[in-house]
Amino acid sequence: MLHAPTKKSISLFGAVNVSSGKLVNLMTPVFNAETFKQFMKMLIKSGSKKKRLIVILDNARYHHALLLKPWLHKNRKRIQFLFLPPYSPELNPIERVWKMIRKNCTHNQYFPSLECLVKSVKEQLNLWDKPNDILYKLCCII
C-alpha cells in the first residue's frame, strides 16, 4: 500500500538589500543545498558587479552543505556568508519581511488551495520587486 502525501507546501528563499529595500526571492518545492545554491546564483546576478554581497544567514543545514563549498570559494570575490548566532532570527532583516508577508497575506485568511496562497504571496512580492522605501525602512540596520 502506498501513502499519498496530503500536505502540500512551497518554500520561499528571500534576500533584501538593506541599502535600497529591493527584494530578491525564489519559490521552490523544497529547501535544500541545490535550491539554495540556485538562489545564491540568482542573487549574484541581481547585485552590483562592483560590490561584494554579504548575505546574512541562519544556521540551516543546507547553508553549510559541502555542495556549496567549491561554489562559494569560486565566487568569494562576489559573495560572503555571515552566519548569525543560533536562535537569533531577530538579527536577520529578512525575518521582518516574512512577518510582514504573513500579516499582509496570510493572517486571518482562508485559502482553498495552495495555488491561491501562492498567488496572494506572489502579489505581495511583486510590489517589492524594485527598490522601495517600505522594505528599506523595515530592514535598515543603521
Image (tube, rainbow, N blue to C red):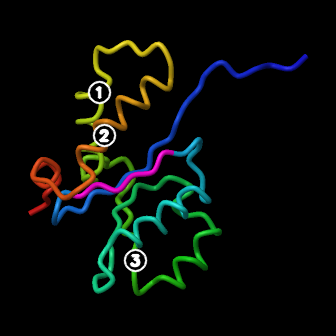
| Residue position marked by numbered label 2 in the rendering | 98
Mark 2 residue type: Trp
| Residue position marked by numbered label 1 in the rendering | 105
Q: Residue 18: image x %, image y %?
A: 19, 62
| Residue position marked by numbered label 3 in the rendering | 79
User: Which mark is nearer the camera, 2 or 1?
Assistant: 1
| Looking at the image, residue 99 lies above or below residue 71 | above
Q: Is residue 23 magenta?
A: yes
Disc 2 and disc 1: Cα gap in Å? Answer: 10 Å
Please state, as top left, top right, bottom left or bottom right, where the N terminus lies in the image.
top right
* Majority SS type along the magenta span: strand
| Looking at the image, residue 74 lies above or below residue 82 | below
Q: Residue at x 40, y 66 (%)?
A: 43
Q: Residue at x 35, y 58 (%)?
A: 85
Disc 2 and disc 3: Cα gap in Å? Answer: 23 Å
Whether pointer 2 and pointer 1 mark residues with C-beta atoms closer than 8 Å, the reply is no
Q: Residue 120: image x %, image y %?
A: 35, 29
Q: Residue at x 56, y 47 (%)?
A: 31
Which region of the structure is painted magenta? 22-27
Q: Secondary structure under badge 3?
A: strand
Please state, as top left, top right, bottom left or bottom right, where the C terminus lies in the image.
bottom left
Q: Earlier in the sequence, mark 2 or mark 1?
A: 2
Mark 3 residue type: Ile
Q: Residue 133: image x %, image y %?
A: 9, 52
Q: Is residue 71 magenta?
A: no
Disc 1 and disc 3: Cα gap in Å? Answer: 31 Å
Q: Residue 130: image x %, image y %?
A: 23, 56
Q: Identify which residue, 88 or 121, lies in the foreground.
A: 121
Mark 1 residue type: Cys
Q: Residues within 10 Å of mark 1 (few under 14, many from 20)?
A: some
| Looking at the image, residue 17 lies above or below residue 12 | below
